[in-house]
Amino acid sequence: MRRYGKHTDEDDVRVRPSRRGTRPRTHRRPAHEDAAEGFVVTVDRGRITCLVEDRTVLAMKARELGRKGVVVGDRVAVVGDLSGDKDTLARVVRVEERRSVLRRTADDDDPHERVVVANADQLAIVTALADPEPRPRLIDRCLVAAYDAGLEPLLILTKADLAPAKPLLDTYTPLGVRHVVTTAERFDDEEAVEPVHALLAGRITAFVGHSGVGKTTLVNALVPERRRATGRVNAVTGRGRHTTVSALALPLPDDDGWVIDTPGVRSFGLNHVDPSRVIHAFPDLAPGAANCPRACGHDEPDCALDDWVAEGHAEPARLYSLRRLLATRERHEGD
């Protein structure tokens, strides 16, 4: 039944008031020009800890950010109570453009990538020479992720008092990857960790590694005033216990850079990396791929890398490692 006549005037139309008020909807967001700049040092269950000037401020993500995540290393804009006092809570209203993003997936079949850290300059791959045994294919995967993210890799070999470093270094030194060798006993004083500190100075370095390799022990030696819990390697499984449960950025002494300690990993999925870019983590093999057929998967009979290796330009073990790495992107295998 028609309530109004044929020539209804707009003044005759009843408008039911909105429960949400009369303010019109808009997609405009406040600019927050007065927001302070913050550096995210850790994220735990939705709470974001930022360094704002010389204060540690606890904040939460503003609703206008939507699904955009905030991770350790992000430069953010923060508003609200920035005093850093107990029981205060600020808001992160903007995430600034990231210079670099280190990503990983749980495994090679997982389509959901996870951002590990943002704005890092360097990726320190920490590997024990024994207890637990080194895992070269995990190192290769971390190298792939580093090159894909535009980070300079650094290989840190720990527990050299238990096994020699030369066999592993023989594989990676020709690639031009910087490295440093340490022992557990050398973590006791500042002078002992100076060779490591020298390679981190002035940079934001993310530390990754298998559980139990001494990653957090080394971070504790570098930043002694902010010690984190450490664990032991299981004598039966040879695996370390996860003691670091969330990433944490720590300033080096004298504000000479940052180290970001991340939870130990059992695998480093590369589902987010285009397979055509994987070879860039193998600079000794990459030039030989120039003669490969178009869209070569580097495991075909006419792959030019076989001749490249046969001519002595690279070690056969490196080609094997590349092909195994590429194969794990088709079918996940243990590292």
Image (tube, grey):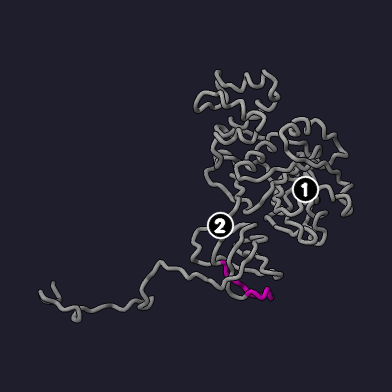
Query: Which of the pair 66/156 is nearer the observer?
Result: 156
Residue type at mark 2 is: Glu
Check residue 101 in the rendering and tell me which mark sits there, or answer none: none
Q: How many marks?
A: 2
Prevalent SS, magenta region: loop
**Looking at the image, is 211 positioned above or below residue 277?**
below
| Span shown in magenta | 82-92
**Looking at the image, is 128 positioned above or below residue 315?**
below
What is the crowding at mark 2: few (fewer than 14 residues within 10 Å), some, or many (at least 20)?
Answer: few
- Position of residue 214 in the picture relative to residue 37 (left or right): right
Residue at mark 2 to residue at mark 1: CA–CA distance:
26 Å
Q: Quadrant of residue 302?
A: top right
**Looking at the image, is 290 positioned above or below residue 214?**
above
- Residue drawn at x 61%, y 57% is 71
User: At which x and y percent is residue 107?
Assistant: 59, 41
User: At which x and y percent is residue 128?
Assistant: 79, 40
- Residue drawn at x 85%, y 34% is 164
Residue type at mark 1 is: Leu
Q: Secondary structure at mark 1?
A: helix
What is the crowding at mark 1: few (fewer than 14 residues within 10 Å), some, or many (at least 20)?
Answer: some
Name of the residue lying farthest toward the left: 6
> Is residue 88 within the magenta segment?
yes
User: At which x and y percent is residue 87?
Assistant: 66, 75
Query: Which of the pair 138/99 is nearer the observer?
Result: 99
Mark 1 lies on residue: 199
Check residue 97 in the rendering and tell me which mark sits there, or answer none: 2
Q: Secondary structure at mark 2?
A: loop
- Position of residue 39 in the picture relative to residue 170 (left or right): left
- Residue drawn at x 76%, y 53% is 201
